[in-house]
Image: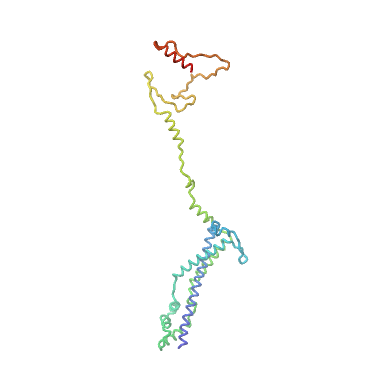
Amino acid sequence: MVKDDLNIENFVKKHESNLKWFRRIYKLLDFLAISVFLYIIFAIFNMDTIFSSIKSFELYTGRQYQFIGFSVLYETIVLVIISAVLALIITLTIHRYSDKTGAIQIIESKYPELRERLKTAYDNRNTRNIIVNDLINSVLESAKKVSSSDLLNKKKVASGILAVLVALSMLSIIAIYDYDTDIKPVDIGKDIFAPEDGDDPDDLPITDNREDDDNNRKNELQGETSIVEVEGEKKDFKFPSSSAPGFNPSGDDNEDTEPFEPSSANERDVISSKAYYENLPEGHQDVIKRYFEEMAKK
């Protein structure tokens, strides 16, 4: 009886161990596929260019290392590591919520004759009576046709292998033809954080008030339009805004103006001008004459 008891326990432990290995294979296939796909995305979008803008990686950018007879860039190694780390996190997250069905439940689902019997026999493996011993013996007899491959999810393995092959094929095409896009994360960062064209936050708005100042100056010189009446005729009397030659407020050129004739250098005639007139008002002639005489002395 002890031999049967050990057999049922060993049988379940064996298949539980196989099931764990199969689930590790699922994780490995998912990890490889996700890693390669992530690296493809990084390579297509030139993520390796971002290292040149990071001080910690800037000194190592462009260096090459020998790996199995191939020269590998430093940027490529870093991208592979980043892809692997992210793939590991994603894979663990996915399989954390995956199916956790045990080996006993899977075997019972595939073999109806063992349904409920295998679990009952395993739970009572330490019990000693005729009924339990007979149950264990019958279960072990039926379990001889159980294979470890029955615990393997063939669809999941096939899909994982297909995903890895597709990812490796795409990676080979990209490596052979050196395919990438024009998108670079450094340029995207500059476009996002750079100010818009023509905008400089350090510049203050400058207003050109020269035209307004000129208009105000003209208004100050010209003033308001004044109407004067000369001999019964109303005329527009306005101070001109310019003293340039030829200015005429009425808009008509004065054609009668005589041209300026400079005096000859040889003419030395002096014309005296009268300081006062002889026909002065009566009673004030002496006072006015003295005034002009005093002015002449000065």
Q: Where is residue 211? Give x, y as percent.
A: 45, 35
In the depicted structure, whether residue 247 falls above or below residue 19: above
What colour scheme governs how the chains and residues are painted in the rendered image of this protein? rainbow
Residue at position x 38%, y 25% in the image: 226
Q: Is residue 228 left or right of residue 183?
A: left
In the depicted structure, whether residue 165 falls above or below residue 113: above
Q: Residue furthest right?
A: 69
Residue at position x 41%, y 28% in the image: 223
In the depicted structure, whether residue 20 falls above or below residue 85: below
In the depicted structure, whether residue 179 falls above or below residue 271: below
Q: Where is residue 43? Give x, y as percent.
A: 54, 60
Foreground of the two, 4 or 259: 259
Foreground of the two, 186 or 133: 186
Q: Quadrant of residue 73?
A: bottom right
Q: Quadrant of residue 249?
A: top left
Foreground of the two, 99 or 274: 274
Q: How many marks?
A: 0
Foreground of the two, 81 or 291: 291
Q: Residue furthest left?
A: 232
Q: Where is residue 191? Give x, y as percent.
A: 50, 52
Which quadrant is home to the N terminus?
bottom left
